[in-house]
């Protein structure tokens, strides 16, 4: 094999490594802890801390393996999730939920008898 063939082979292998990386885990974008930032109730959006509800009442911790801890209204459940780039499908306590994902935010819509409430979450950035 000539020098040109070896150089081309190295370039191709390097390109494939860059394209596919050593991990094809699409979940990496959302892996980590997510905390509430805002809530929309009856069409009015407020910062979550203005509601007087403790942050540990709502949140998610997503793991690379497709499992997570989901805390809704203070109750934590272990669940499986599927992330497709624009949403997260998750089943919590027998109920299916779809969280929309956009610009680094997750949004959960909850249908209460009084109407819809949406909670927006941001990923905790470790320092």
Image (spheres, rainbow, N blue to C red):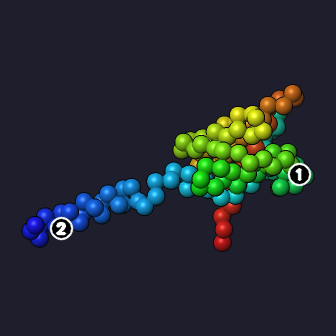
User: Residue at label 1?
Assistant: 53
Residue 118 visible? The answer is: no
Is disc 2 in contact with disc 1, using a CB cutoff of under 8 Å? no
Identity of the residue drawn at 13% across and 64% down? 5
How many numbered discs sit on the rendered protein?
2
Camera-nearest residue between 57 and 52: 57
In the displayed structure image, the side of residue 51 where residue 100 appears, left or right:
left
User: Residue at label 2?
Assistant: 7
Label 2, secondary structure: give it. helix
The C terminus - image quarter? bottom right
In the displayed structure image, the side of residue 120 where residue 29 appears, left or right:
left
Camera-nearest residue between 69 and 60: 69
Identity of the residue drawn at 67% across and 40% down? 90
Mark 2 and mark 1: Cα distance apart in space: 61 Å
In the displayed structure image, the side of residue 22 where residue 61 appears, left or right:
right
Identity of the residue drawn at 10% across and 67% down? 1
Marks 2 and 1: which is nearer the front?
A: 2
């Amino acid at each position: 094999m000539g020098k040109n063939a070896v150089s081309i082979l190295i370039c191709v292998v390097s390109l494939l490594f860059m394209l596919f990386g050593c991990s094809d885990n699409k979940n990496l974008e959302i892996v980590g802890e997510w905390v509430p930032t805002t809530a929309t109730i009856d069409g009015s959006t407020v910062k979550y801390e203005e509601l007087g509800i403790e942050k540990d009442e709502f949140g998610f911790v997503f793991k690379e393996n497709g499992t997570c801890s989901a805390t809704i209204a203070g109750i934590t459940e272990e669940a499986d999730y599927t992330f497709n780039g624009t949403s997260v499908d998750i089943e919590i306590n027998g109920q299916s939920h779809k969280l929309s994902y956009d610009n680094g935010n997750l949004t959960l819509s909850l249908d209460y008898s009084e109407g819809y409430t949406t909670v927006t979450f941001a990923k905790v950035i470790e320092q």
